[in-house]
Amino acid sequence: MFGYHGKFLGVDLSAGETRALEMEERHLKDYVGGASLAARLIYDHVKPGMEPLAPENPLVFAVGPFTGTTIPMVSRSAVCGISPLTGIWGEATTGGVFPFRLKAAGFDGIFITGRAEKPVYLYINNGKAEIRDAAQLWGKDTYQTQQVLKDELKDRSLSVSCIGQGGENLVKYACVVNDRGRVAGRCGLGALMGSKNLKAVAVTGDARPDVANKDKIDELTKQARETLSSGLMSMVYREYGTLLYMDMGMFLGDVPARYFSRNVFAAKKVTGQALRQAYTVTSHACYGCPIACGRLVKNFRKDIDVDGPEFETAVAFGPLCVNYDLDSIVQANHLCNAHGIDTISAGVSIAYAMQLYEQGILDEKKAGIKLEWGNSRSIVKLVEMIIGREGIGKLLGEGTRRMAQELGADPATAAHVKGLEMPMHDARAFTGMAISYATGPRGACHLKGDYYNIGMAGSVPELDIKSGNRFRSEGEAEMAARYQNLKDMYDSLLLCKFSSISLTQIAEILSNITGRDYSPLDINTVGERSINLKRAISNRLGVTREDDKLPTVCTTELKEGGTADRSPDMDVLLREYYDYRKWDWETGKPTKDKLLELGLEDAARDLWSS
C-alpha cells in the first residue's frame, strides 16, 4: 500500500484498550484517506436519533497519502465525527506539524470510541500506543497542555492535539487545537473529544510509508514548490495572511457586517496592513509550506506572543459586531485558541445576541451585560462567558439555532445552515457560494467549495469549471457541485486549500505516490462518492431537502455595496443542483441508482429499504 501504513489505531476508552485496525485496500482506493475515509469508517456506527456525545460514537483523526511526503502544503489532518453542534456529519481540518507526526507515529489515523472514567491522554510513538492519566492536564488551556506534555515526554519532535476548557465544558462548537494555535475549528469536535474525557493526543515517530515512484515524486515536488513560491498570491499571503482579502472583499460585497445586514464598513481599520501597523507581526508556516500565511502578534501582553487573527476571525469579532478595535479582536481570537472554541460560531453568536439586544428580544437583565453594537469589552467578556458556560454564555455556546429557539426569535434570523453558523463570505456576492452553503456536507462552510475563488476569475479547466457572471443563478449550481467534489477531495489527500497546483498535477502526484492511476475525472469521482456518503450519513440523522436552505437574514437584498439589489435565486440553484447530483427532490436523499453507481451499496440499502 504505497503512501499508507494500511492501518488505523483503534482506541476503546471505556475498556482502556488499543489495537491496530487494518484498512481494506479497496477503501483506500475508493476514499483515498482523510475525511472521506473517516466517513467510510464512521458510517457503520450511525443510527437514526443517535446522541452525538454518546460514548459509542466515534471520534476520528485521519491523515492521507499526501501527508508525510515531500510535496509542499500537505501537513494537514482531519478530525471527524457526528457534530455535537449540528447533530449531523461533522469534520474539520488542521495544519501545523501534528499531521506529519501522526503519520510518522505509524498510523493513517485514529478511531476512538468509548468514554474514559477519568481524564486521559493518548500517547503514540512509532506504532505503540498508551492511554495515560491526564488529571494534571484537566483545566489547563491548549498552550499549557501542549507544553506540559512536551516537558513530561521529553521529546522535541512531539506534537500534541488537545482541547481546552471549551471542550471540557462541552461548548457545542468547541474545537481541537495543535501546534500552538493551529485549529480543527468547526462542528464542535472538541466537545466530542471532551465528552470522552480525552484531553490530548500526543504523537511522535519516524515511520514513513514508501511511495511508488520516488524519483517522479521528487520531480513533482520541485515543480510544485516552484509554482507555489513564485505565485503572486503566495507572496501576498506571506506578507498579510488571509486578512489581505478584507478591503477587496468589501469592494465585492463579500464581507458581512452588522450581523449580515450591511456590507459597507470601515475596512481599512481591520486589514492585514492595519494589523502590521498596530503590532509587530511575523509569519509562520505549517510544516513543509513555502507560503507561511499564519500570523504571530509579538509582545501582545507583557511579552506574550499570540497567534494573530485570520480573515474569518477578524470579520466575525470585527465588522460583524460593528467592532473596529483591533486589540479586542486579537484578544478574542487568543481566548478562543487558548480555550478551544470556534471563532466563526462564537463571533456569529455574539453578533446575533447584539442584533436581538437591539430588537429588544434580549435585554440587559437577561443578558447580564450591555450588548450594544461595537462594544469591544462586551465581545471579549462574552467569549469568556461562552468558554466557561457562564450566564448568557451558556446559551451563546449552543449556537444561533438554539438561541433563536430559546429566545423566541424568528428562526430565519439565525445565521446558520443545518446548525453550523454562516462563515464570513457573503452568500449574496457569489451565487456559487450560496448553493455551496445550502448543500455542503457539514452545513454552512466556506471551504467545502470555496467558490468565491472561481467567481473572481478562477477556473478548473479539467472539470470545465470557469468564471462567469458571479450573480447568475442559472448554470452555476452544476459547476459549484463539481467544485465541491474537488475540494472534498483535498480533505481526503490531505492538501491545503491554498495550494495552487493544478488538478492535473494533483492526479499525477496521487498516481505516483500510490502506484494507482488517477485521472482528473477520477479525482472528481472520488470526491463525488465522498459527498454522497456524507449526505447519506446526514440523511440517516434526519436531513431532508427542507434543510438545504439559507437563512433569510443572509439573502435579503441590501441597498448598497457590491451586492446592491442582488440575491441568489435559491429555487433555481437548488433544482439544478439536485438534477446534477441525482438527488431525490422529495426526500433530499441521493437516489438509489446514484448510490449504486458510486459503489455505496450499504447506503442504498439503508436509505431506500422500504
Image (cartoon, grey):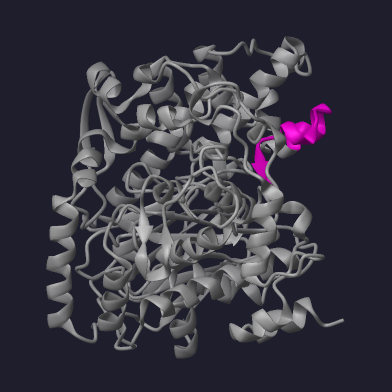
Residue 295, percent across and down? 28, 35
User: What is the x, y in percent for residue 327?
Assistant: 38, 17
**Is 187 part of what is drawn in magenta?**
no
203, 492: nearer the viewer? 492
Q: Residue at x 80, y 66 (%)?
A: 587
Q: Is residue 410 magenta?
A: yes
Q: Is residue 333 visible?
A: no
Would you identify the image quadrant in which residue 144 lies?
top left
Q: Nearer the viewer, residue 345 or 566?
A: 566
In which quadrant of the rendered image does the C terminus lie?
Answer: bottom right
Above or below for 482 versus 596: above
Residue at 25% in and 76% down: 208
Above or below, 228 against 255 in this view is below
Left of 320 or right of it: where is 141?
left
Residue 366, how many percent across, how many down? 76, 16
Q: Residue at x 25, y 33 (%)?
A: 240
Residue 400 relative to residue 222: left or right: right
Where residue 206 sits: x, y (%)? 23, 71
Q: Please indicate, yes or no, whether residue 109 appears anywhere in the rendered image.
A: yes
Bounds of the magenta span?
Answer: 402-419
Above or below for 50 versus 209: above
Front residue of this view, candidates 543 and 193:
543
